[in-house]
Image: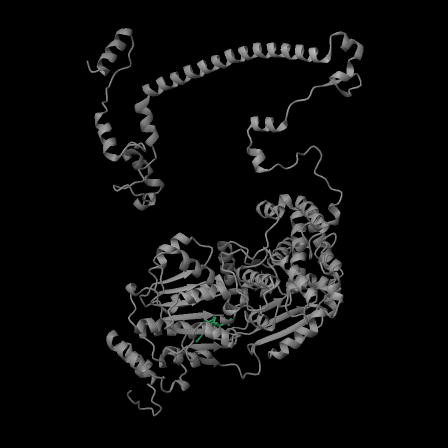
Amino acid sequence: MPAHKNGDNRPPASTVRKDKKIPEKQELKQLDERCKHPIIGADSFQQFDELPISSKTLSGLKRANFIKMTDIQRKALPLGLCGKDILGAAKTGSGKTLAFLVPLIEMLYRQKWGPMDGLGALVISPTRELAVQIFEVLRKIGREHSFSAGLIIGGKDLKIERGLIAKMNILVCTPGRLLQHMDQSAGFDCDNLQMLVLDEADRILDMGFKKTLNAIIENLPKQRQTMLFSATQTKSIKDLARLSLKDPEYVAVHEKAEHATPKNLSQYYMVVPLPQKLDVLFNFIKSHLTAKAIVFLSSCKQVRFVFETFCKLHPGVPLLHLHGKQKQQKRAETYAKFAAQKAAYLFCTDIAARGLDFAAVNWVIQLDCPEDPETYIHRVGRTARYEASGQAMLMLCPSEEAGMVKALERVRVPIQEVKLKQDAKDVKKEPIQKQMQRLCFNDPEVKYLGQKAFISYMRSVYLQKDKTIFDVNALPAEEFASALGLPGAPRIKFVEKSKAKNAARGSQAKMDEDEALLGLASDEDMGEEEEAEEKSKVKALEKKKRGKKEAVPEAEEPTADSATTKQPMSKIEKMFNRKNQSVLAEHYTKLVDHETDRKATGDDEEEDFWTIKRVDHDLGGEELPEGEPLPISKRQQKMSKIEKLKNKGRGHKLVFDEDGEAHELYELEDEAGFLAKGDAKSQQKAYLEKERVTMEAADVEDKTISKEKKREKKAKQRERERDMMNDSDEEETVATLGTPDYSDDDGDAYSHSDNGSDGEDMDQDEEETPKKRGWWQDKADAEEAKKKRKVVEVDEPQTLEDQEALALRLLGL
Ligand SMILES: Nc1ncnc2c1ncn2[C@@H]1O[C@H](COP(=O)(O)OP(=O)(O)OP(=O)(O)O)[C@@H](O)[C@H]1O
């Protein structure tokens, strides 16, 4: 290793800059040399160009305005460049992305990675949005390199991805989708992988993704460099063993810092009774119309409800929403829109809590309490990023205050209480509750959303692990429902009623609670990662229930495609999931009612923990509008008339008396008269005989009519065929108009747009378009037939002689 003039053995910045001009081969040699050993003097490096980084990467960094390194970059990059395994922890917004992307690109560059080498590096992110963001940074700084890089996230066409994935050198992906490709895409192998990165590692390693990640790791070679980054890093030995890390370096730059959150972040909390939360939020928005803010809620349904209702209340600032149940395209659009807005409010679940780097967000509002202090840190980290400042507001229910504040103190989060201002209370003279009620009253869809939001909120509170913070019984359910504008609280039934009161719960009680949790398994409310976690909880509980004695908390997590842990949905729930919800909302509530009534009678005790007993008290007496047919199933709709008649059974003859009352035929005949005609049996025989004769006569008549109809139909068909024969030439041309041949010479389909012709070239296409080939003909046959076809030009035949002459010409005589 050559010594340098400046005494600390590090190359001066000028030396590195000069390197830019040296040939690539020489540069590679120098970089290799410097990265073989711990980089000398790296402790005092401040800028990227002081590190042994290729000129191509440096140029990418410079163009993106990355000149000076952040703390985590200064510490992690020298280690990463030397091939060390790293556990990186640093505050949110402190530049962890570059701390792993630069070593990744450089490692492949130094190894002269090429298209034939296959997959060299893998970056796994817990959410799609974060994966997209990482990919964008990779593109920016790697723009001068020639590696192929792909983004593999759910919600896109699997086939298209499959075609490309085998050719990629770098992949940025979400766990579920990656595993899907590992399982299903032939030609995708990771045998050559050199580097694995887990961004938001603690999230990917936790229960939610455990099984998926284990399966992924099994497919990766053990000899590789591994880097884990997060603002809240895992230190679990078990986790690290799973990843086969080799002497990892723990790089935690802010561990000794006074606070775990960015220093430019001001953090407040406010104790707000649950029923007033929406009111406070709405007033906050009205008084901060120029803010760019992210509002966190606990479930997708909450997000939808608050978004939909607030949009209708027109607060005067753009509102957006993001959650895991949206289609990928919608999610991407929302992400892009919010990123571009100067002032806007984004309502979201924890899907947006980690890693997302929206510029200039000045407020993070947590309407619902986060599940733990780590989630709090990630949520508030969406503001005050890099050198910017920001503010965060946490709304706590009175029952959550003590537990949460203590938990935040424990992880060094400086948070300060603010009280609701008096004038803010005055605003509540006209609370939005009234407007919410109006919205729910006028629009059943809104009311329905409100009901779902109510239930999913209560459920999320119940499911929280930390019972020192979350207590569902302390929540004022009725008042909360009213605040949402609902006419009454959807009734929620606890199976084990005594368990909450019973302080010393025995193991049986615990088991019952577990069973109750199983009943909550099918939450179609959660996002991908939330859902994964939920499923794993359920699976763990199922295991317990089966009597397994082993410790469960780290139970496997189902893969993205395994839905086996979900409780089977009832028929009605499935139907409801399929149907147009706005149409069915009211009807559904009644169906649910019946369903739960049935369960309450003991049909299904496992689901008897809490279910919607009656979703809406107002609906009690409502019936379907009079005269409106009951909804019929699709199968019924598809039945032919004959099938329907069959199912109807035989007709039944009734006779109406003078008062319009229906009677059986025999009721109107007097008995003496009846017996005078003979005994019942002979009368029945005579009646049947008479009816048989009548039926036979009718049958003959029907057959004659039917034959006549068939004859007419055939005649018409022959006539049509004759006409077609006469006009065949003309018709063939018409059939090919505007129908280009979509096959090339090999018969492969090609896109019409390939020839670059749009509407303008259409006329030309039409003229030149050959006659359409029948599916039964190959191209040669068609050409032959075309040659054989003669064109006979004639004048319109006027007389019988003309016609005879034409016929002879056509016959070729
Ligand atoms: N060296 C740098 N110079 C200037 N800006 C930087 C630098 N490094 C990172 N940034 C910027 O800082 C912001 C935060 O970076 P990044 O997203 O990597 O943070 P993070 O630590 O991964 O945050 P989180 O923990 O929330 O995922 C980004 O906007 C990024 O462009």
**How far across and down, in percent of the image, does residue 538 sit?**
59, 61
The front one of 505 and 348 is: 505
Which residue is drawn at the image coordinates 53% and 59% (left, top)?
528
**How far across and down, in percent of the image, does residue 687 sit?**
67, 11
Which residue is drawn at the image coordinates 33% and 85% (left, top)?
12
The front one of 614 and 510 is: 510
For the N terminus, the image quarter is bottom left
Taking the image as shown, residue 410 lies to the left or right of residue 329, namely: right
Q: Is residue 290 above or below residue 163?
A: below
Q: Residue furthest left?
A: 813
Residue 299 visible within the image: yes
How many numbered dots are placed on residues in this image? Answer: 0
The front one of 666 and 459 is: 666
Taking the image as shown, residue 107 lies to the left or right of residue 282, namely: left
The front one of 386 and 1 is: 1
Taking the image as shown, residue 647 lies to the left or right of residue 25, namely: right
Q: Is residue 232 above or below residue 576?
A: below
For the C terminus, the image quarter is top left
Residue 430 visible within the image: no
The colouring scheme, among rainbow, by chain, secondary structure or one colour, is: one colour
**How far across and down, in percent of the image, does residue 637 sit?**
57, 34
**How far across and down, in percent of the image, does residue 524 sit?**
58, 55
Taking the image as shown, residue 195 lies to the left or right of residue 337, namely: left
Q: Is residue 21 above or below residue 438?
A: below
Which residue is drawn at the image coordinates 70% and 64% (left, top)?
472
